[in-house]
Amino acid sequence: MSVKIKIMERQGKDLYQRLYLIEVFKGMVVTLGHFITNLLDNSKLLVRHYPEVQPEIPVRWRGRHRLTVHEDGTMKCVACFMCQTNCPAKCISIEAGERIDGRTEKMPVKFEIDLLECIYCGYCVEACPMEAIRMDTGIYSVTGSERKPFILGMGEMLATKGAFTEEEYKKGGA
Ligand code: SF4
Ligand code: SF4
């Protein structure tokens, strides 16, 4: 079987066209023009002066996780492992134990999320039957120079409050 080959005409035949010097120069003029304009007056620059100016976090933004509690302060999580099972990154680690706060069901004695593995997909939130885990903390900047601080523990997750009211959260559909 013969293969049909389409021969394309090469663009830019003479030296002037092949060097593209004029077009390169035109591009540099545009760049230099922007540079000088912004140097003299940067008020119209479309940049955010972070960290002085913090971004507005919408309700549906998936930030760092937290664990929610009942009105009496007891943990909502019943250690059902639904979040851990559904986590595509396999970065949730739970150990279940006996409930000691008077409620029925189990509770986690260990609940950790490896934020270096997490892909912030929100499946853990979707999977939870108790609305016990949420990503509505508004915490978007998680930085560190060692691996250990990236292991988010149960205490830290319970201590973090949501950035929105319950009404805002429900309205946001997160
Ligand atoms: S956001 Fe996704 S990857 Fe991160 S812990 Fe939840 S399910 Fe796992
Ligand atoms: S956070 Fe929700 S899904 Fe995960 S173990 Fe607790 S109750 Fe189950």
Image (cartoon, grey):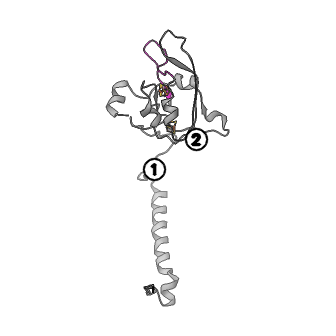
Q: Find numbered disc 1 in the image and state the secondary structure of the residue it sits on.
A: loop
Provide the secondary structure element on which disc 2 rests: loop
Tell me where residue 27 appears, x and y as whole percent: 47, 72
Q: Is mark 2 within 8 Å of ligand 1?
A: yes
Q: Position of residue 171 (x, y in %)?
A: 31, 31
Q: Nearer the viewer, residue 6 or 168?
A: 6
Which residue lies at the image location 46% right of the left edge and 75% below the top edge?
A: 26
The circle on residue 117 is: 2
Vertical arrangement, residue 28 with respect to residue 158, above or below = below
Observer-nearest of 91 and 28: 91
Quadrant of the rendering where the N terminus is positioned = bottom left
Q: Position of residue 73 (x, y in %)?
A: 48, 14
Q: In which quadrant is the C terminus drawn?
A: top left
Check contact, mark 2 vs mark 1: CB within 8 A: no
Residue 40: give x, y in percent of width and height. 47, 57
For marks 2 and 1, the one nearer the N-term is 1
Label 1 C-beta lies within 8 Å of the nearest ligand 1 atom? no
Residue 82 seen: yes
On residue 28, which mark appears? none
Q: Which residues are magenta?
A: 66-78
Residue 64 visible somewhere in the drawing: no
- Residue type highlighted by circle 2: Glu
Q: Residue furthest top?
A: 102
Label 1 crowd bin: few (<14), some (14–19), many (20+), radius 10 Å: few
Q: CA distance from mark 2 to mark 1?
A: 30 Å
Number of numbered discs overlaid on the protein picture: 2
State the residue position of label 1.
47
Q: Residue 151, located in which quarter of the rendered image? A: top right
